[in-house]
Image: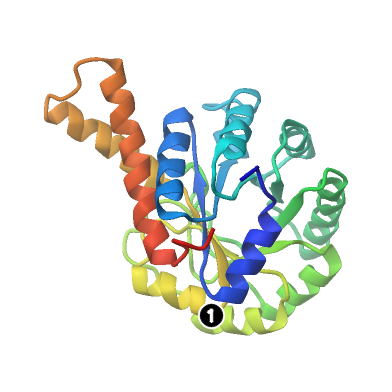
Amino acid sequence: MPLVNMKPLLEKAKKEGYAVGSFSVANMEMVLGVLKAVEETKSPAIIQIAEVRLNHSPLELIGPLMVAAAKNSPMPVAVHFDHGKTTEKIKQALDIGFTSVMFDGSHLPFEENSAVTASVKQLASGYGADCEGEIGCVGGSEDGSEDIAINCTSPEQAHEFSEKTGVDALAVAIGNAHGNYKQAPKLRFDILEETAALVKAPLVLHGGTGILPDDFRKCIKLGISKINIATATFDSVEQSARAAYDANSIKGYYDLQTAEVEGAYRNALRHIEIFGCAGKA
């Protein structure tokens, strides 16, 4: 199946009561591992990279690889630019062929966030791509460099924001945070339920690493259709490579590559099972 847009994947997930995993990648090995799990389980998926990661994985290099991988997958795979901060990089992602982009204006005043997100939505639409926005502030930070406080989404503001911007997906803050949690978060399921009742667009959960499986399932039941997984992928790849070295099974570079692919594969496989998207391609 060719590279697909994010919107139809999420609309189907919303209708059928599961979530699509949106897996952050940083190199070819992570892409290969995620897509191996996707193809094995016959699942839809999204592969993504956040703007803050581009110092380590330049967009002009990793982006075409991601798009080519999605085009060559037999499963429906969207390619997403996550937590876009600048129009310049968002446009670059669209020029490369990403099928969805996110503008993260959660740190901005409501009216400014709405206005810029609406302009990014218009830009993406010109490419035939989809747009995700965020209302409320997810804690932590995408690269772990900041400890941003959680500011939970207002359901009423979420509705207003969605109507003003026309976004195809909306990320909400319900006590979730980026990075590794020190303890399992106490999610505000009441806010999620109220927001889902008011907002037509599929809802997105960021900061998925460390959320308990039952909490994931409850979020999906209450309206989450896309779940971002980043830190868990990076941790699993690193741990897989470390375990292979400890077992003295790394005899050369390609053994290391195999270990990295395996780490991304196992992590994606585990989350696909939790999200209920296996067999939904």
State left or right for residue 119 relative to residue 159.
right
Vertical relation: 88 (above or below) 83: above
Relative image position of residue 224 (x, y in whole percent) = 56, 70
Residue shown at 65% from the left, 43% from the top: 3
State the quadrant of the C terminus. Answer: bottom right
Give the quadrant of residue 79.
Answer: top right
Across and down, in percent, residue 17 comes to: 53, 75
User: Would residue 76 be visible to someone looking at this image?
Assistant: yes
Furthest residue in direction left, as rendered: 247
Q: Secondary structure at mark 1?
A: loop
Question: How far from the left and from the top, in percent, is residue 50?
Answer: 59, 41
The quarter of the picture where the N terminus appears is: top right
User: Disc 1 designates what residue?
Assistant: 222
| Residue at horizontal 66 percent and vertical 54 percent from the top | 6
Quarter of image, res 138:
bottom right
Comparing 13 with 264, the one in front is 13
> Among all residues in the image, which is located at the extreme top?
252
Q: Residue at x 62, y 31 (%)?
A: 63
Q: Closer to the camera, 193 or 155?
A: 193
> Does residue 5 appear left or right of residue 22 in this picture?
right
Choose between 264 and 280: the one closer to the eye. Answer: 280
Within-10-Å neighbours for mark 1: few <14, some 14–19, many 20+: many
The amino acid type of the residue labelled 1 equals Leu
Asked if 134 appears above or below 141 in the picture, the reply is below
Q: Foreground residue, 108 or 264?
A: 264
Left or right: where does residue 107 sit relative to residue 232? right
Q: Quadrant of residue 13?
A: bottom right
Q: Is residue 235 visible?
A: no
